[in-house]
Image: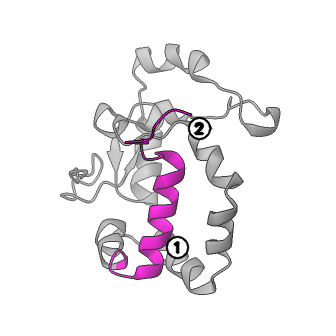
Amino acid sequence: MRVPRPCGVCGAGGAAQYRCPRCAAAYCSVPCCRTHRERCTPEPKREQERPAAAQALPGGQQADGPWSVEDILTEDDEQDRVPLQKLELLGESEELRALLLNPHLRQLLLTVDQAEDKSSLMKKYMQEPLFVEFADCCLRIVEPPEKENILPE
């Protein structure tokens, strides 16, 4: 579980949900982002690492934009990171596509995406069987269960 941090611009305690892709400073809102951007001084190490962090995206595109995943992840976040190759498997899953045809599930996902307090909303939705089925399906795809007690053929 991620510990909320105070905003580095306005000081609001536990409200910083976002990070500057250049220097990793925490901030809580668009106005704070703009204020921070005006006075942002990137860490030299991060700026030097950026070219090495550029990766090819699906379709042959290059991730040479203003930020990359490596820029926004901290060591605390690294344990929750799912490799891009495994995330691509989600798009290939027929089971997941079938679940996403359900309008109720799509509405739940939109609500989570737009929520300010995603963590508590996720806890609430994990009580909904349809949402649990979706979460379990995603987990099975990105972290398949190890096959136990299966005899080799």
Does 69 sit left or right of 129 as displayed? right
**Badge number at residue 122:** none
Q: Is residue 125 left or right of residue 48?
A: left
In the rendered image, the residue lying farthest to the right is: 59
Residue farthest along the bottom direction in this orientation? 104
Q: Is residue 113 above or below residue 7?
A: below
Front-most of residues 60 and 98 = 98
Q: Earlier in the sequence, mark 2 or mark 1?
A: 2
Tell me: residue 17, above or below residue 36: below
Tell me if mark 1 has few (under 14), some (14-19) or many (20+) residues whose alpha carbon lies within 10 angstroms of its own. Answer: some
Could you say where residue 26 lies in the image, as x and y percent from the top left? 33, 45
Does 50 sit above or below residue 40? above
Q: Decide which of 38, 21 is in the foreground and name it.
A: 21
Q: Give, as a three-letter code, the residue at label 1.
A: Leu
C-alpha gap between disc 2 and disc 1: 21 Å
Q: Is the residue 7 above or below the residue 131 in the image?
A: above
Tell which of 7 and 143 is nearer to you. 143
Magenta range is: 125-153
Q: Residue at x 45, y 64 (%)?
A: 135
Residue in view at x 64 percent, y 73 percent: 100
Residue at 81 percent of width and 32 percent of height: 60
The answer to if 138 sits in the magenta stretch is yes
Question: In what quadrant of the picture does the C terminus appear?
Answer: top right
Q: Nearer the viewer, residue 96 or 74?
A: 96
Residue 115 position, x and y percent, is 42, 73
Question: Magenta span has 112?
Answer: no
- Residue drawn at (23%, 54%), measured in percent from left and top? 4
Where residue 86 sits, quadrant-wise, is: top right
Residue of label 2: 84
Residue of label 1? 109
Q: Secondary structure at mark 1?
A: helix
Residue type at mark 2: give it: Leu
